Image (spheres, rainbow, N blue to C red):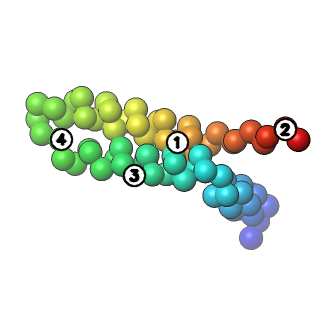
Amino acid sequence: MNVVASGLLAWALARLGEKSTWAGLAGLVASMAFLPHADADAAVLQQIGAIAGSIASIAAILHQERKAPK
């Protein structure tokens, strides 16, 4: 395994230990579930909502939680 791949794997495993990552993954899955079910009238609003939810979820996944001061 090269340095980049091992670094990405270490980062991903570290992220899975934080609550915000799991909340972001749940939000991402939930927001993407609305895309195929939109009818013609509500499609644009549902897609905007799904995209906004996806962006917020990705931000939650990537945002590192602050450690509590000792």
**Would you call the spot at circle 3 few (<14 residues within 10 Å), some (14-19), or many (20 or more)?**
some
Query: How packed is label 1: few (under 14 Cα within 10 Å), some, or many (20 or more)?
Result: some
CA gap, disc 1 and disc 2: 26 Å
Q: Earlier in the sequence, mark 2 or mark 4?
A: 4
From mark 2 to mark 4, how far is it between C-alphas?
Answer: 46 Å
Q: Which mark is residue 29?
A: 3
SS assignment at label 4: loop
Residue furthest to the front: 70
Q: Which residue is the extreme one toward the bottom?
A: 1
CA distance for labels 3 and 2 = 33 Å
Closer to viewer: mark 3 or mark 2? 2
Lower sequence index among marks 3 and 2: 3
- Examine the rendering and report whether any part of residue 8 can be seen: no
Q: At 26% across and 45% down in the image, what residue appears?
A: 34
The answer to whether marks 1 and 2 mark residues whose Cβ atoms lie closer than 8 Å is no
Labels 1 and 2: the sequence-earlier one: 1
